[in-house]
Image (cartoon, rainbow, N blue to C red):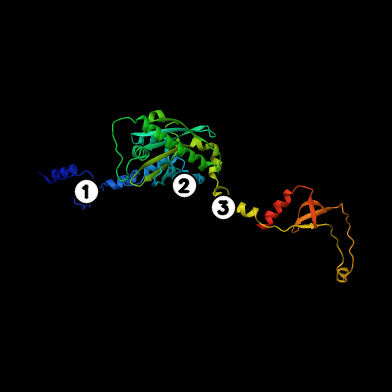
């Protein structure tokens, strides 16, 4: 073959003219491992439910409103935990510890699909808010409550029988516990706004407990109830539509003096105030004199008062006039009979002065 033929063959095999030129080796693209894929998508099996979302998952959930924008909710639920600890101890006559696991925002439809069955769902109505809420009691707590209330011995796990519906006795006992929790919820919201939560019905199928549209946002509160070696979870779900009428109240900061009331301290303060001695003065007349005339007073001098036996006497506490009265005598004592009501302005001034 001629040289021209060889050249044509090489040109056809290398149309871009790269023969004879050193070309760097092209590295293969790096493949992401499973952990990097999970981080990119925002899903991590080791995360808690309340952990912060990342990646695509954060973008998907960005439409939800965070409960942290309603700071008073944490105060209300903390108060609910304290009240439930006391009331459930009285209800079960056992050592009960209630703890707040998590507060999060969730779509109502996602929550219904995530409820572990079997469970009892209590639908309740908030009368003043004109809407509904949901209280879920898991199977562990149901059997534990039944075991405690019916005299089960401590140290033995509650007997669970899967694959059967809850009996009437179990439903009645759980209903009584739900009513206790709702009464505590009434007291927890009371300092913020009067709300009455009334039990509407009990359901075992989540499809029959649909109180909102699947895409609606809601607040989910997870509570843990421990009774020594027994216990379970209670989940309280409040749709944002239920909280909307009191949204402005939930946006405000903690009201320490109003919300953190201590009835024992208030009763003690009221008792001490009733037994406190207060000095009052009866002023018959007042005169203004030059200092030179006051310095010239001598023993035996007489001051003429511009008052008669029928003149009103001003009763004062310090410099604040409290009321008026008439001067008189009772036995061997000079007395003052109160003629007018106690001045509200005077009482307010005294209170402010003591602060």
For label 3, the crowd category at 10 Å Cα-Cα, with few meaning under 14, some 14 to 19 and many 20 or more, is few
From the viewer's side, name the closer residue of 278 and 351.
278
Q: Position of residue 270 (x, y in %)?
A: 62, 51
Q: Is residue 200 left or right of residue 116?
A: right
How many tags in the picture?
3
Q: Position of residue 137 (x, y in %)?
A: 38, 37
According to the image, label 3 marks what residue?
265
According to the image, label 1 marks what residue?
18
Q: Secondary structure at mark 3?
A: helix
Cα separation, mark 2 vs mark 3, equals 18 Å
Q: Is residue 178 left or right of residue 352?
A: left
Q: Which mark is residue 82?
A: 2
**Image quadrant containing the N terminus:** top left
The residue located at (45%, 38%) in the rendering is 180
Toward the left, the furthest residue is 1
Labels 2 and 3: the sequence-earlier one? 2
Residues under numbered marks 3 and 1 in contact, where contact means CB atoms less than 8 Å apart = no
Cα separation, mark 3 vs mark 1, equals 93 Å
Toward the top, the furthest residue is 208
Q: Secondary structure at mark 2?
A: helix
């Amino acid at each position: 073959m001629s040289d021209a033929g060889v050249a044509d063959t090489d040109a056809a095999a290398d149309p871009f003219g790269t023969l004879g030129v050193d070309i760097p080796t092209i590295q293969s693209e790096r493949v992401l491992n499973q952990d990097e894929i999970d981080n990119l998508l925002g899903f991590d099996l080791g995360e808690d439910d309340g952990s912060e979302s990342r990646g695509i998952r954060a973008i998907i959930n960005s439409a939800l409103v965070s409960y942290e924008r309603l700071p008073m909710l944490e105060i209300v639920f903390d108060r609910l935990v304290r009240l439930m600890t006391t009331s459930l101890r009285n209800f079960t006559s056992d050592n009960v510890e209630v703890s707040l696991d998590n507060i999060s925002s969730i779509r109502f439809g996602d929550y219904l699909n995530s409820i572990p069955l079997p469970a009892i769902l209590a639908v309740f109505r908030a009368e003043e808010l004109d809407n509904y809420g949901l209280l879920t009691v898991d199977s562990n707590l149901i059997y534990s409550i039944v075991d405690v209330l019916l005299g089960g011995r401590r140290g033995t796990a509650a007997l669970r029988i899967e694959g059967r519906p809850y009996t009437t006795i179990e439903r009645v006992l759980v209903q009584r516990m739900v009513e206790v929790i709702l009464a505590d919820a009434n007291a927890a919201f009371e300092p913020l706004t009067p709300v009455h939560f009334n039990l509407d019905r009990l359901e075992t199928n989540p499809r029959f407990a649909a109180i909102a549209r699947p895409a609606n946002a809601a607040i989910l509160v997870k509570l843990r109830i421990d009774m020594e070696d027994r216990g379970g979870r209670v989940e309280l779900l409040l749709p944002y539509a239920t909280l909307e009428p009191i949204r402005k109240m939930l946006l405000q900061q903690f009201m320490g003096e109003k919300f953190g009331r201590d009835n024992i301290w208030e009763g003690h303060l009221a008792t001490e105030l009733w037994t406190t001695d207060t000095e009052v003065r009866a002023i018959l007349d007042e005169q203004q004199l030059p200092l030179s005339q006051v310095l010239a007073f001598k023993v035996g001098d007489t001051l003429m008062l511009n008052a008669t036996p029928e003149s009103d006497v001003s009763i004062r506490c310090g410099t604040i006039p409290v009321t008026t009265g008439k001067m008189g005598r009772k036995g061997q004592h000079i007395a003052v009979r109160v003629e007018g009501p106690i001045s509200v302005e005077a009482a307010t001034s005294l209170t402010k002065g003591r602060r």
